[in-house]
Image (cartoon, grey):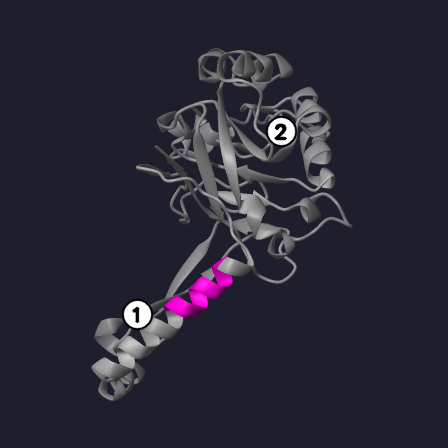
Amino acid sequence: MCAPTVMDAVAARMTRRGFLGLLGAAALAGTVARAEKRVAVKGFTKVQDLTHPLSPNFPMWPGFDPIRITPLVTVEQNGFYGNRVDFWEHSGTHMDAPAHFDADGPTAEQLPVERLFAPLAVIHIAERAAKDPDAQLTPDDILAWERRYDRLPAGAFVAMYSGWEQHASNAVRYRNMDASGTMHFPGFHPDAAAMLIEEREITGIGVDTLSLDFGASTDFKTHLTVLPAGKYGLENLAHLGELPPAGATIIVGAPKHQGASGGPVRAFAVWD
């Protein structure tokens, strides 16, 4: 955080020559860093934000409080603006790190940065989900995708597009809870999760719903298959229907606080 007085002092002392010198130093540092470790992302012409705005109105898992945003200072009264933000790690569009379901798994800040850039496969089950809220992405869906687009590339991130985001503005509809308290929304079938872990080389999986498992799950077997295998999950993704089923790259701005079981992310897809 930089208060206006600090910024004024910096500006007063920053000559044009000094500024250009800083730019040159920063560029050199960036070049050195890139030489040490490169993450390949091919050239792209299109980009899509995959993130819902994080707000007190976004649907939460039952039993957890929504995000609280409390204004602390304002430009009018204090000369600068800032909020206090309090939230459960698994709020909004967020990551489930392996540690979320595995006591020995890495926390979010321990994931190698290379795994936050991945070939993106979007598998559509929206037509089925429109008729059955308990629809699940199955091994047959994966095989059908591969027949059309070729085998999943190594290191792929596999996302389920169910169209469920259309309900995100209505928490009751998004959770879709019946009289017994059971939720009904789409997710990955555990057999599909097992196939991706055992027979394919993936980085993680993602959904446009509240959970990697479908809403009526009681054993969370998809979580227990994917996360202890060292992979991560993304939940409450947005705009997956705007993407090509194959050929995009996902970029995940992952949480990096200490001991993170997960946390809100800013995820993007880029493609030609």
Label 2 CA crowd tier, 10 Å (few <14, some 14–19, many 20+): many
Where is 247 relative to 55, above or below?
above
Residue 133 picture location, percent across and down:
52, 18
**Amino acid type, residue under disc 2 in the picture:** Asp
Give the total of numbered labels. Answer: 2
Residue 90 seen anywhere in this rendered image of the structure:
no
Mark 1: few/some/many CA within 10 Å (<14, 14-19, 20+)? some
Could you tell me which residue is drawn at 70 percent across and 24 percent down? 199
State how far apart marks 1 and 2 are (Cα).
39 Å
The label on residue 213 is: 2
Q: Residue at x 21, y 73 (%)?
A: 76
Q: At which x and y percent is residue 88?
A: 55, 52
Is the residue 59 above or below the residue 37 in the image? above
Where residue 248 sits, quadrant-wise, is top left
Q: Is residue 257 magenta?
A: no
* Mark carried by residue 24: none
Q: Which residue is mark 1?
A: 81
Mark 1 in CB contact with mark 2 (< 8 angstroms): no
Drawn side of residue 173 relative to residue 255, left or right? left
Q: Position of residue 261 (x, y in %)?
A: 64, 51
Q: Which element carries disc 1, helix, strand or loop?
A: loop
- Range drawn in magenta: 27-34
The one of 249 and 168 positioned closer to us in this rendering: 249
Quarter of the image with the C terminus is: top left
The earlier-in-sequence mark between 1 and 2 is: 1
Residue 233 in picture, x, y percent from top left: 59, 38
Q: Residue furthest right?
A: 104
Three-letter code for the amino acid on which mark 1 is drawn: Tyr
